[in-house]
Image (cartoon, rainbow, N blue to C red):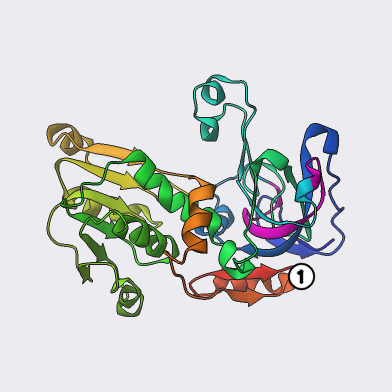
Amino acid sequence: MRAVIYDGTAAHYTTDTPQPVADLAAGQSLIRIEYATICSTDREILRGYRPDFQGVMGHEFVGRVERSSDKALVGQRVVGELNINCGSCLYCQTGRPHHCQTRRVIGIEGHDGTFADYLVHETRLLHAVPDSLAPEVAVFTEPLAAALRIVEQVHFDPDAPVALIGDGRLALMIGQVVALTGAPLTVIGRIPEKLALFEDFSVARLLEPSGSYEIVIDATGTPGSLPTALALTRSEGTLVIKSTYAGDARINMSEVVVREITIRGSRCGPFAPALRLLQRGLVTLPPVEVHAPQDFQAAFDSPAFKAALDFR
């Protein structure tokens, strides 16, 4: 089958990767990939973010089930969660499966991903896509779920100001999720054309950071923005770090202690509400830019809002 493989150093397109086989007795499904979209995390893998990973890249997808331990899913279009948890460790037993001690992550750690014709995945981690939802929209479920994770973790006072640093793909989804809480939102970015996408749901769009905010969300994807994010956070406020990247970041931890700032890391989120928001049109996103799998490098290099590999 066709696939984009990471060998520990670089990505390569192949046509002779063996098709995976689903173990139906073990609760697995075989999914024929339709679209697999590129995430900033995929780009960071190429920069050394996950040096131990080798295999098929990618974790955002929409596809159709061809074989499954759940016969009702066969022929159904689905999306799927990326964290494969054991179900029995301390974290799984205490409602924190995304932090499973032996978790595998499709396309990132210990499990082949979605940049291929086929994916084998745990049936319990699949979510049926409503017939009314186009696959080009459904493919945004995983990153939108990641945006929703923030409102799971942090209480938003509708009268308290929020700053979102970043004007990229994830930031646009986070901004719309935050706007649904009613909180006044200021978006801080670098590119006027991108900031214009936020105008319908933000109270201000800034090229230069200013002011102070009860909640500050860093969605830039770069470690250099953290000192700015910390400076914008009010004393006893909350700084949410949404970015993952290769390398380390530095902030003044004494300032965090003295000003009693709460720092929250935020990663993967709930799929079902993300699908509902997309189905109801409460979150709108620019169209996906589609590339053939063999043109994966162009997709990785694309400045488009979202690039996808088309495996149909």
Relative height, residue 298 to residue 12 (above, below): below
Q: Does the magenta stretch include residue 67?
A: yes
The x, y position of residue 167, in whole percent, is 35, 67
User: Is the C terminus in the top left, top right, bottom left or bottom right quadrant?
Assistant: bottom right
Residue at (42, 64) in percent of width and height: 282
The amino acid type of the residue labelled 1 equals Arg
The image position of residue 53, as x and y in percent, is 65, 44
User: Residue 20 at what x, y percent from top left?
Assistant: 84, 48
Camera-side residue: 281 or 157?
281
Q: Mark 1 points at which residue?
A: 312
Is 122 a magenta residue? no
Quarter of the figure with residue 142: bottom right
Quarter of the image for the N terminus: give it. bottom right
Magenta residues span 54-71
Is any part of residue 145 visible from this angle? yes
Q: Is mark 1 on a helix, strand or loop?
A: loop
User: Where's residue 188, x and y in %?
Assistant: 25, 65
Query: What predominant SS class does the magenta segment belong to?
Result: strand
